[in-house]
Amino acid sequence: MNLTTLRQELLATEYFGNTTWDYVVALAVFLAVFTTLPILKAIITKNLQLLSKKTKTDFDDLLVNLLRKFVGPFVYLWAAIYFGTLWLTLPENLAQLLHTLFVILVTFKSVQLLQGFVVYGVQQWTKWRLEEDP
């Protein structure tokens, strides 16, 4: 038995309904998502900060603060777990649970972001009203 055949047999071996290759791909997707999201956040945050220095409004400062505040390691971890497990054949109830938890996380973070926008809007409106009629 040569090395190529052994490697192919190892990668084709099944555990819990998935081949070793499926687990390798799932791990690669997990690591890619878990490492890419913080890098993307840093790039976006830096570009927004540079843009905010050029503008007179503070809306872009709000975007930077909301991005820093609500997107962090917990979001990276759950996104990586969710997208990594999409490559695996999981029991239906486990797949549904992971999907539901991911949707809950996205919904919760979206509501937090919307809340930040509403607070900003109320603060701007209050500031505008006080300037007009102290």
Image: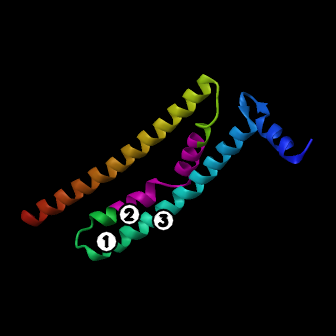
**Residue labelled with disc 2:** 64
Find numbered disc 2 in the image and state the secondary structure of the residue it sits on.
helix
State the CA–CA distance, disc 3 to disc 2: 10 Å
Report whether 5 appears left or right of 99: right
Q: Position of residue 17 (x, y in %)?
A: 72, 27
**Disc 1 + disc 2, Cβ < 8 Å:** yes
The residue depicted at 69 percent of the width and 38 percent of the height is: 22
Q: Amino acid at mark 3?
A: Ala
State the CA–CA distance, disc 1 to disc 2: 9 Å
Name the colour scheme.
Answer: rainbow
The disc, 3 or 2, on the residue closer to the chain's N-terminal end is: 3
The residue depicted at 52 percent of the width and 49 percent of the height is: 75
Note whether 91 is above or below 134 in the view shown: above
Q: What predominant SS class does the magenta segment belong to?
A: helix
The residue depicted at 60 percent of the width and 53 percent of the height is: 32
Residue 68 is one of the magenta-drawn residues: yes
Foreground residue among 113 and 133: 113
Give the extent of the magenta segment. 63-83
Report whether 35 appears left or right of 70: right
Q: Amino acid at mark 1?
A: Ser
Name, please, the residue furthest toward the bottom: 54
Q: Position of residue 123 (x, y in %)?
A: 23, 58
The residue depicted at 7 percent of the width and 64 percent of the height is: 132
Name, please, the residue furthest toward the top: 92
Quarter of the figure that contains the N terminus:
top right
**Residue labelled with disc 3:** 42
Q: Amino acid at mark 2?
A: Val
Q: Dot 1, how many residues are within 10 Å of its Cα: few (below 14), some (14-19), or many (20+)?
A: some
The disc, 1 or 2, on the residue closer to the chain's N-terminal end is: 1
Residue 44 is one of the magenta-drawn residues: no
Find numbered disc 3 in the image and state the secondary structure of the residue it sits on.
helix
Q: Position of residue 125 (x, y in %)?
A: 17, 57
